[in-house]
Image (spheres, coloured by chain):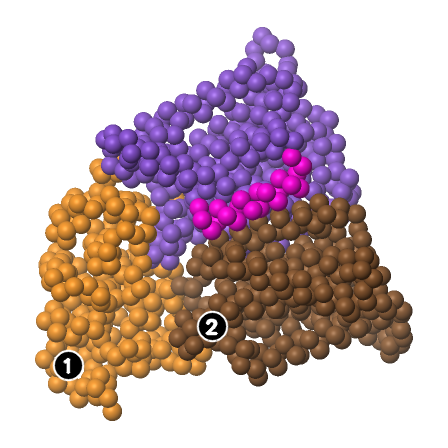
Amino acid sequence: MSELLFGLLLHGLITGTMYAAVALGLTLTYGIMGILNFAHGEMLMVGSYVAYVLVTQYHASFAVAALGAMAAVAVLAFIIERSTFRFARSEHLNGLVISLGLIAILQNSALAIWGADPLSIPPPFPQIIEFAGTGIGLQRLLAAVITLALLAGLILFLRLTSLGKAIRATAQNPAVASIVGIRVNRVISITFALGATLAALMGAFVGTIYTLTPFMGGLPALKAFVVVILGGLGSVGGAIVAGLLLGVVESFGGAFVSSAFRDGFGFAMLIAVLLVRPWGLFGQRPERDEM
Amino acid sequence: MLELRDVSKRFGGIGAVESLSLAVREHSITALIGPNGSGKTVTFNLITGLSRLDHGEIRFNGARIDGCMPDRIALHGIARTFQHLKLFPEFSIVETLVLLQQPRGLGSSLASVRPRMMPDRLPADAQELLEFVGLWDKRTEPAGSLSYGQQKLLALVSLLTMEPRPSLILLDEPMAGINPTLITTLVRLIRTYRERGRTFLIIEHDMAVMMDLCETLIVLDHGRKIAEGPPDAIRVDANVIEAYFGR
Amino acid sequence: MSGGAAWRIQALAFVAAGTAYPWLFAGEYMLHLGILVCLYIILTSSLNLIIGYTGQFAVAHASFYGIGAYGAVLLVTRLGLHYWVAWLLAILLAGLCAWVIGFSALRLKGAYLAICTFAFSELFRLMLDNWTTLTNGANGIIVRFVPPGPRLPGMPAWSFDSRHRAYYLFWILAALVVWLVAHVVTSDTGRVLKAIRQDEILAVTMGFPAMRYKLFAFVAGSMLAAMAGATYAPYISFIAPDLFDINETVYIMMIMMIGGIRTVAGPIWGSILLVSLPQILGIKPSVRMIVYGFILIVIMIRLPGGLSQLAAQVGRALSRSSAAPGPGAAPTSPTLAKPDDA
C-alpha cells in the first residue's frame, strides 16, 4: 500500500515539476510585463512540433531536437515580444487580446501545416524502470530530473548573476530599474524568451510522453494558470511549490476519486483559491485600491 | 464631524500610520501636513475606505465608517481628490458633472428612462462655477485633453457640484503642480464653499498657503501626529521644525 | 444634439436593410449567411456590453452561448418541456451561472477575471466532453425539433421550419439585442459603466456601487449569449462541445474588436464583414483565423477602436476637407457616428 502511495507521490512530483516549469514562464512574463500571455501554451506546442520535425525528418537525436526546439521558440518569442507585446505594456487589456490573436495564429498555422491528427515523438528512453518498488517510465523520470535541474539553475541564476538580478529589479520597479542603468527593454525580451524556451522544452518532453496536436497547448496553459494563481502572480517560488502541489493533488485525486475528471481537480482548486484567497497561497492581500 | 481614534495601519510590519487620533470640526478648513511619507495619503485612504485599518475607529458624525466600502462612505457625505490625479479621461466636463448628478444605485439607473438631454441636467451652480475657474468654454472637451491645472480644477469642481452634496471634502495636494494664479482661484473656491457649509481637510506642501487658509493644522511624521493647532502655534512648534528640517 | 439625427438614420437603415435582406438576397445559402450574421451580431453586441463598455475582460462568452444551446436542447429532449419554456429556462440558467461566477470573479483584478473565466470555459467544455450520459460527449446531440411559432387566432399551428422564417426569427432577436444594448449604453446606466471602465476606483469613491454594475453587465451580456445559443441549436440541428469552447470566444472577440468596441455599430459591421466574407470567398476556417489573428493584433497596437475608429477618422477628415459647417459641437462621421458623443 505504501508502495502505491509512494508511486502516486512520485508520479505527482514528476508531473508537478513540469507544471512548475511551464508556470514559471507565465509568472515571469506577468511579473515583468504585466501581461497575461494566454498563448503560453502555444509556445509549448511549437516546441513540440519543432522537436518532432527534427527527430522524424532530420533524424536528430532527442537531445539535439530538444535544444533545437528551445532555440526556435526563443527566436519566436523575441520576435513576438518586439513586434507585439512591447506596444501593449501600458494597456494590459491589449496584451491579453494580442495573446488571444497569437493563439489563433499559432494553432491554425500548426493545423494547416501538420493537420489535426495526433503525432508522437519516439522517446529515446521508453523503458520502465523499478524505483523503490514502483514502476516509472524512464523518459518521464529523466524529463523531471532535467527539469528540476533547470529550475534549480534558474533560481540560482536569478539570485546570483547580474542579469538575474536585473530581471528581478525590473519586475519590481521598471522605472527605477531603468534609472539605475538596466536596459529594461532588453531584460524584458530576455525574460519573455526564457519563459517561452522553458515551455518549449516541456513541449519536447510532452511530445515523447503524450501526443502532439495543434491544440495541445490549451490544457497545459490552463494548468499553468492554476499554478500561477495558487502560487501568487509573479512569484517564482510560489510557481514551483504550487506546480508540485498540483501534480501531487492530481495524482492522488485521479487515483482515489475519479480518473476521468483528473484535470478538473486543478480547476476546483483554482475556484476555491479564487474565492477564498485570490492573491495565492504565498501572496499578500492587496488593498481595495489595488483590486 | 470626523474623528479618528487610535488608528493604525501597517504595511508588512512598517507602520504607515500609528495610533493616530484626530478630529475635524464641522465647517472648518483643516490642514493635514507633514514630510513626505508621513502617512497623509494613507490616512485619506483609511477614511474613504480604500484601505482597511488594522486598529482603531473612524467616526463620521458619530457613525462608524471604518470597514465600510468606499461607495457607502461616499454616500455618507465624504468626497476626495487624489494625489495622482484621477479623472474620467474620455468624458467631457459636462458629462463628468452629469454623471455625478445621477442616482448612484443600479436600480435607480436602470429605472431612469430620461432622454440624454445632458446640458439640462447640469446642476444649477455649475455654469457659475465653471466660468469662475475658466472651464466653461471647454465644457464639451474630453477631460483627458485638458491641461494638468485644468484637470485639477475639474476634480475640485466635480466634488463641489456632485449630488448628494458631500459635507466633508478631502483634498490631496490640490495645489501641486499648478501655477500661482490658479492657486488663488482654488483658495477663493475653498473659502466660498466653506461659507456655504462645507468642511475641508487638505493635504498640502505649500506651507504659505496653508498657514493662511486653514484655521487648524495637524502635523504627521512617520505615521504619528506630532502637533495640532492653529498656524501660529504650529509655526513655532519644536517638533514640527525638527520633523521638517532634520534632526 | 449632434449625432442624434445621424444615429436615427443609421438605425432606420439597419432595420430596413435587415428586413429587406431576404428579398434582396434570396436562396438557401444567402439566407443561411444572413442568419449567421444575425447570430454573431447578438454574440458580439452582448460581449461588447461586458468588455467594450464596462471594461471587464471575461472570456467565457462561448460557454454561456453553450449553456443556452445545450440547456434548451436537454430541457426539451429530457424533460419534454415546450421549446419556448426551455428557451427561457436555459437563458435564466445562464444568468444564474454568470451571477455566481461574476459575484466571485468580478471582485478581483482584471487578470484574475480573465483567468477565472478562461478556466470556467475549459471546465465547461470538459464537462460537455466527459459527462456523456447527459451530453453525449464529443459526439454531440442531433436536434430534431424546431421552434414553434406563436398561436394566432384563426390560423393553424406553425413553426419556424423554413430558413426564411428562421431568418426573421434571428433578425428580430438581433434587432432587439442591438436596441437593448444601444439603450443601455446611452442611458444613465451606460454612463456609469463607461465610468467604471475608465477608472473603477474613482467611480467607487464617487459613490457608485461598481460591483453591482459590473455584475449587471456581465449577467445581462451572458444571458443574451445564451439566448443566441438556445435559438441557434434547433436551426443548426446539431450541437457539439467544440462549438462552445475558448476558440469560439476568441472568434467572437475578434469580430467585435475588429469591428470596433465601444460603439454599437462596430459589432454589427464586424459581423457583416467578417462572418460573410470568408464564406463568400471560400476561405478555410483555419486560414480565416490566422488572418483575423494578424488583423486583431494590428488593431490592438495601432487602432484599438477597430474599424469604427477608422471610419470615424476618415469621416472627420472628409468633413473637415469639405469645409462644411458641422451640425453641432463635435464633428461626427456621417455613417458610423458613435451614439455616445457629448
Which quadrant of the rendered structure holds the N terminus of chain C?
top left
Which quadrant of the rendered structure holds the C terminus of chain C?
top left
* Left or right of C210, for residue C104: right
Decide which of C144, C335 is in the foreground and name it: C335
Mark 1: amino acid: Ile
Q: Residue at x 25, y 91 (%)?
A: B247
User: Magenta part of the protein: which range?
Assistant: C283-303
Q: What is the letter of the purple chain?
A: C
Residue C55 lies, in percent from the top left, at 45, 49
- Considering every residue shown, the one lying at the far top of the view is C154
Q: Residue at x 12, y 69 (%)?
A: B213
Chain B: give its colour: orange
Chain A: give its colour: brown
Quadrant of the rendered structure where residue C250 is? top right
Q: Is residue B176 magenta?
A: no
| Residue that mark 1 sits on | B234
- Mark linked to residue A183: 2
Res. C28 in view = yes
Q: Mark 1: which secondary structure?
A: helix
Decide which of A75, A160 is in the foreground and name it: A75
